[in-house]
Image (cartoon, grey):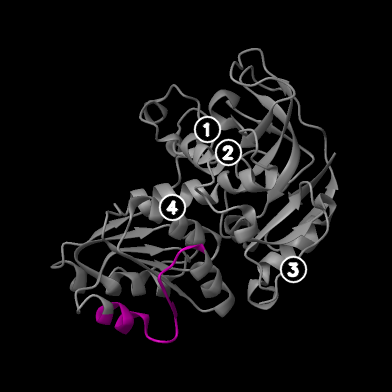
Amino acid sequence: MKALVFHGPGRTSWQDVPDPGITDATDAVVRVESVTICGTDLHIVKGDVPEVAPGTVLGHEAVGEVVETGSDVRTVRPGDHVLVSCIAACGRCRFCRESHYGQCREGGGWVLGHLVDGTQAEYVRVPFADLSVHPVPSGVSGEDAVLLADIFPTAYEVGVLNGQVRPGDTVVVVGAGPVGLATIATARFHTPGRIIAVDLAESRLRAARDIGADVTVNADEGPEDLVADLTEGLGADVVVEAVGVPQAFEQCTRMVRPGGRVANVGVHGKPATLHLEDLWIKDVTITTGLVDTHSTPMLLRMMAAGRLPAASALVTHRFELSRMEEAYDVFARAADTGALKVVLGGPRHDELSVPA
């Protein structure tokens, strides 16, 4: 089969690799229908995630058809249309028993495209299939479902739930990329009073307004002053960092009110300064975390019920699977290409670009 293989910082190739097979009795092999590229994949390619060994197939988000299962798999069978979660879960260790699947200690957690071969391929072996793949509800397309492999559960769990968004809250989302947009959409489940989106790109701020932000502001045009004005100088109840750069994190800590919450969702490749000289007296809670995907079944139901934005709200570019390297280039140059989410495969194989 063909797959995108990591060869070290700055080097990948779409090449022939051996077909995956069942290694453990809890495995499933899935034929990939739709797959996407994550900002974390870009961090890997840049060399920010040194645990990824050269020779690894990248990717941790996919939808496809089960073609083979191990003898212990009970929840899916060949022919099922499934979502492949970015997180695998053994279901037995202490963390899995607490639904903290991202911290699985028995070979699960974030392993696909990280510690084992991932989803940016024609086929993928999925460990611990009973908890790591989810049947796609009738009426939900593969392109819609693939957004629930990572960005929607990450936004909801690490941003909205960790941030404890409550009715009436003022919520600021810094970064209106795919995860930031998913944060805006899922924060609305909890009826905040106001959602403010901050980004540098007008195309992303436009997408934020379309998906439910009440106010948008360019990151270079005084978001801290705007938040202060809208909250009578108090600051936001919840600020979500969805960029993954030190300046954005530090900006978040300046916009939160005393007693408020900062939820860091962005993947950081460099250290950020924690200004305790300012924060120690403010009773601010700062959370971090890797997604657990415990919310994925609920989010699939919400998608089926029409309560989540369709892929068309976030997907700006579509490619054939074989054009993986071109898709990476487009996604990596988002400031020039206007890319939000890039999907490969699926029912539509023609490239669609939305002007910046």
* Residue at the spot 26% in from the left edge and 82% down from the top edge: 229
Q: Secondary structure at mark 2?
A: loop
Q: Secondary structure at mark 1?
A: loop
Residue 34 placement, left or right of 159: right
Nearer to us in this view, 338 or 1: 338
Instruction: Give the residue type at disc 2.
Output: Ser
Q: CA distance from mark 4 to mark 2?
A: 18 Å
Q: CA distance from mark 4 to mark 3?
A: 25 Å
Q: Secondary structure at mark 4?
A: helix
* Residue at the spot 35% in from the left edge and 48% down from the top edge: 161
Q: Which residue is mark 1?
A: 108
Q: CA distance from mark 3 to mark 2?
A: 27 Å
Position in image of residue 236 (x %, y %): 27, 69
Instruction: Give the residue type at disc 3.
Output: Ser
Front label number (3 vs 2)? 3
Q: Which residue is mark 4?
A: 186
Q: Is residue 144 visible?
A: yes
Position in image of residue 240 (x %, y %): 38, 62
Q: Closer to the N terminus: mark 4 or mark 2?
A: 2
Q: CA distance from mark 1 to mark 3?
A: 36 Å
Q: CA distance from mark 4 to mark 1?
A: 26 Å
**Dots 3 and 2: beta carbons under 8 Å?**
no
Q: Is residue 113 visible?
A: no
